[in-house]
Image (cartoon, rainbow, N blue to C red):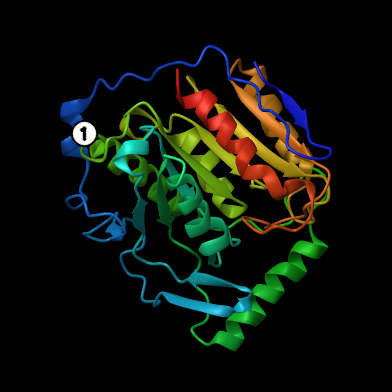
Amino acid sequence: MPGTIVISNGPTRIPRVADKPLWALTCATLLCACLSVTAVASTGDAIPLWPQGAPGSENWQQVEVETDDLIPHRVVRNVVAPTLQPFLADPGENTGIAVIVAPGGGFKFLSIDTEGTQVAEWLRQRGINAFLLKYRLDETAANATLFKFQVGWMMFNAWLAGDDDYPRIVPSPVRPLAIADALQAIAYVREHADQWGIRPDAIGIIGFSAGGAVATGAAVNGSGIQRPDFVASIYGVPDEGDVPGNAPPLYIAATADDPLIPMALGEQLNARWLDAGYNSTLVRYPDGGHGFGMEQKGTSTDNWIEAFHRWLLATAID
């Protein structure tokens, strides 16, 4: 059973996860009754996860906005209507594995490309069916300048707060709603697995930063049709809930120089999973900071997605 892998220089082989359980689906008839999503969309179309309105935010009035002047990447904020955008593998290369991708952004925005579309497309090109999740976020100012001040204030508080045992990000009240979106996304993909050529026992989620909290929250809270078969948290905020019974295999990537999410948090999450008797792999990088996503920074994290891909294949394929 894997524990901790330390990366120094260059790529490292991720060992195969032993004794992978197969999750049987025993509630097929209940599945259709529980879901309220629309019919499957074609590749590239954004699928509304809650077509009748997302529960818990029915009265939200903010308007979703895209911008590229906050950081050198496109970001999305004020998400009210969560969606799932498919990046389906070519039929001849389809492994049958599905990965839901949850970008980060402190629950204030989504780094939609470097932690979203670019990750999904990389996986799609290697036969993995990827699904980009836009989950609900904290409301931010409609005015772009005020929004930047809000993000700056969040980062200032992050700099002031925390220590080696706590994330330097203030918890968000929207987090449970974002986790609910992830669980709905997992259920949706599982319901349409046959139509997409996906194995219903090979559906998982990867999250970055705040998206890592969404991913591990899905691991802690998901059951039945909503349960992920594997979970990955990349420099993520760990969920503090109890390790669930029959917990899915967990993959954690953390950096020693992360200014927002101390590596100790990843170590603690890894230990909790292992102590409960479940599979967990922690990959420790000496550098790379926070929020690197698909950027090539000339650090030890540059090959993180190749390492994750090897773990994913070993975990999801018998």
Q: Percent position (x, y) of residue 144?
A: 55, 86
Q: Is residue 241 visible?
A: no
Q: Amino acid at mark 1?
A: Leu
Q: Percent position (x, y) of residue 47?
A: 28, 57
Q: Percent position (x, y) of residue 199?
A: 32, 29
Residue at (66% x, 59% y) in the render: 295
Residue at (40% x, 76% y) in the render: 62
- In the image, taking residue 195 as reference, residue 317 lies left or right, namely right
Q: Quick check: 80 above or below 9?
A: below
Q: Percent position (x, y) of residue 166?
A: 75, 47
Quadrant showing the C terminus: top left
Q: Nearer the viewer, residue 309 or 200?
A: 309
Task: State which quadrant residue 282 falls in.
Answer: top right
Q: Quick check: 207 above or below 112?
A: above
The residue carrying mark 1 is: 31
Q: Nearer the viewer, residue 19 or 50?
A: 19
Quadrant showing the N terminus: top right
